[in-house]
Image (tube, helix red, strand yellow):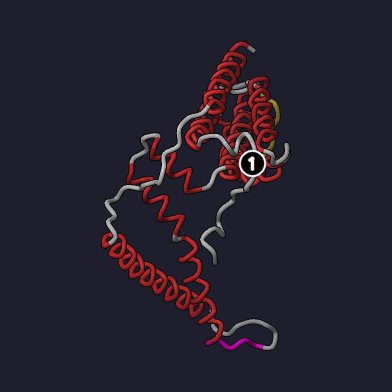
Amino acid sequence: MHSHAFDRYHHKHSFVHNLDPRVKVATTVAFILSNALLPDGAWVAFLAAYVFMLAANACSGLGLGFTFRRSFIALPFALAAVTVLFSIAGAPVASFQLLRWNIVITDAGLARFMSIVVRSWLSVQMAILLVATTEFSKIVHALRQLRVPAILTVIISFLYRYLFVLADEAMRLMRARASRSAIASNGKGGGSALWRARVAGNMAGQLFLRSYERSDRVYNAMLSRGYTGELRIMQARQFCANDWLMICVLLLCLAFTQIVGRML
C-alpha cells in the first residue's frame, strides 16, 4: 500500500489550488465557525453560505457538484441531534405515540434540527474541498504556521504518514490467518464464535506489539538523523495577491452572512 493511498488530493492548476495553504485552512475554519454562529432558521444566510461554497467549487476546477456528491456521508451523524425535535418548547407541529409516551415535535425543535443538519452539511463540504485542493503535508505545515501546538501537528503528521504501514501489517496478519485456516466447501470457516473472538483478540495484540516495536525503531532512527520534535519545510511560502484577495472576499462573505442571518 502506497503512502498516498489515503490522500484525497486532486492535482489541478486552479485558483483555489494555488492559494497559500494557510489561507485555505483559515478559510475552512472561519466558514465552519460562521455557520455555527448563525441563529437557528437563518435559511437565507445558509443559502448565502452555500453560494460561497459553490463559488469555491467553481474556482477549484473540480466542478460545482464535487463536494455535493461526497457530503451526504455526514448526514447520518447529524441524526444524533434528533432529540431536539421534541425536547425544545414551541408550537406543536406533529405528534405520534411511542410505547407509553406521546412524542410532540415542535416548530422550534424542527428549526433547530434542520439548522444542525444544514450546518453539518455545509461544514463537511468545505472540509472536503480543503483536502481535495491541498496536500495533507501542506495542511499540517499550515496548521503549525498558524500556531497550532507542535505536539498536535506532529501527532497528526505521523499518524497519517504511518497509517498505511499499520494497514499493511493488518493485511499481513489476515493473510497469515487465512493461510492457516481451513475453509469448508460452503465457504464458511470453522470454529465457534468464542474461538473467532479469541483469534481476533490475538491478532489485535500482535498488531499492537508490531506497531509499538516499529514506532520505537522509527523514533530512534529519527533521533539519529537530528530530529528535535519540530516539523521543518524547505522553503516557507509568502503571501501573494491572490491570497490577500481571498482573505478580503472571505471577510466580506462572512460579514454578509452574519448580518443577513440576524436581520432576516
Give the vertical position of 232 relative to 239 (above or below). Answer: below
What residue is at 64 percent from the left and 21 percent from the top? 45
Q: Is the magenta stretch mostly helix, strand or loop?
A: loop
What residue is at 47 percent from the left and 48 percent from the top? 137
Residue 104 seen by the camera:
no
Give the vertical position of 124 relative to 231 (above or below). Answer: above
Q: Is residue 42 magenta?
A: no
Give the vertical position of 158 relative to 169 (above or below). Answer: above
Residue nearest the viewer, comparing 111 with 56: 56
Quadrant location, the C terminus: top right
Residue nearest the viewer, comparing 69 with 90: 69
Per the image, label 1 sits on a secondary structure element best described as loop
Coordinates of residue 89 in the picture (x, y in percent) = 57, 23
Coordinates of residue 212 in the picture (x, y in percent) = 34, 67
Residue 149 seen by the camera:
yes
Residue nearest the viewer, comparing 51 with 62: 62
Quarter location, residue 49:
top right
Task: Please give the range of residues in magenta.
Answer: 180-184
Residue holding disc 1: 13
Coordinates of residue 157 in the picture (x, y in percent) = 42, 51
Q: Is residue 181 magenta?
A: yes
Quarter location, residue 260:
top right
What residue is at 41 percent from the left and 39 percent from the top? 236
Coordinates of residue 238 in the picture (x, y in percent) = 45, 32
Under mark 1, the amino acid is His
What residue is at 67 percent from the left and 35 percent from the top? 57
Q: Residue furthest top?
A: 263
